Amino acid sequence: MCIFRTFFILLFYDLLFKPPYTERKKMQEDMININAQLRTLSAHQEKIREEERKRVAGELHDELGQLITSIKIDAEWLNKKIGDEEIELKKKTQDIIQLSSETAKKVRHLAQALRPSILDDMGLIPALEWQFHDFKSRTGIEAEFYHSVDGIKLSEEISTHVFRIVQESLTNIIRHSKAKKVICDMTIHNGKLYLFIKDNGVGFNISEKKNTFGLLGIKERIKMVGGTFTINSDLGQGTESSLEIPISN
Ligand SMILES: Nc1ncnc2c1ncn2[C@@H]1O[C@H](COP(=O)(O)OP(=O)(O)OP(=O)(O)O)[C@@H](O)[C@H]1O
Ligand SMILES: [Mg+2]
């Protein structure tokens, strides 16, 4: 009796409140369309952000860098004109020379951090080599980058995505892993680019959900270029990420 009552209540609820099949199907399709639109919007915004980074990095390096160099040249000229007896003036101009050298160096660093010119001028491999060299000298963590992709011209889109993914992975290693060693390997085989990064740090529990954006951003980038991304980690076992991107059209 009780079962029948529940059955009728559910049937009654279904008929009254649940949208009919065709309406549900339409809602599902709408959701899929909205998702696709959001993904396109996110890809478009990322492209704009990258172009903006490139523009600002270029202006910092070329415009500001040039101005600072001019100040330095003028100060050096002044310094030569001032006689050795003008101790205070000589000291001030030397300070200006020193300060402008340091500022020029900072500006170059800022421009490189924003978008390394090597990525646009020489391509992904030299940019990654530079990135690993910079990582090693900043952190003291042993880092090796291997590749076997000489002579292959990758699109700017793929090069940028791979560069940013490696950048986020290295940032995660610095921030979370306590690793002593990192290995990265990149190959191209049968029209696909394969890359893995492995650290020997503390690892983490993959199933633990966190409200963070780094790994989410990596997954979005990979989706934009039709690739796949996997990350494996266990507490005490280090972390290994690998990606696969189709590169031939
Ligand atoms: N190499 C790693 N070693 C240890 N833990 C890691 C590593 N990479 C990621 N994690 C863990 O995965 C979590 C998610 O990483 P994710 O990059 O998404 O976020 P985040 O670095 O904490 O913050 P952000 O959004 O600024 O990137 C991290 O908080 C960290 O706990
Ligand atoms: Mg992160």
Image (spheres, rainbow, N blue to C red):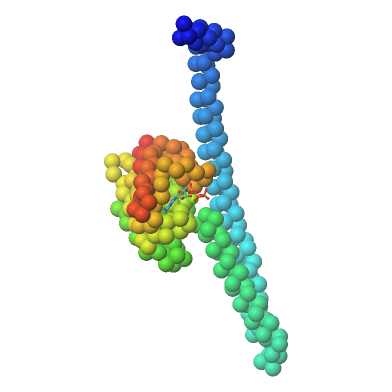
Residue furthest to the bottom in view is 85
Residue 151 visible, this orientation: no
Quadrant that contains the C terminus: top left
Position of 169 compared to 184: left or right?
Answer: right
| Left or right for 41, reference 123 | right
Can residue 34 be spotted in the picture?
yes
Q: Locate residue 18 relative to residue 183 in the image: left or right.
A: right
Q: Among all residues in the image, which is located at the extreme left? A: 190
Residue 50: where, in percent of width, then height? 54, 47
Instruction: Tell which of 152 and 196 is nearer to you.
Output: 196
Against 9, residue 82 (above or below) is below
Please report the residue visible at 58 percent of the width from the left and 66 percent of the height from the top.
106
Look at 38% across and 57% down and name the residue there.
201
Residue at the location (54% across, 55% down)?
Answer: 114
Percent x, y for residue 1? 46, 6
Q: Is residue 244 above or below residue 58?
A: above
Q: Is residue 221 left or right of residue 106?
A: left
Q: Is residue 113 above or below residue 106?
A: above
Write down the quadrant of residue 170 in the picture.
bottom left
| Residue found 50% across the figure and 7% down from its top | 5
Q: Residue 229: x percent and y percent? A: 39, 42
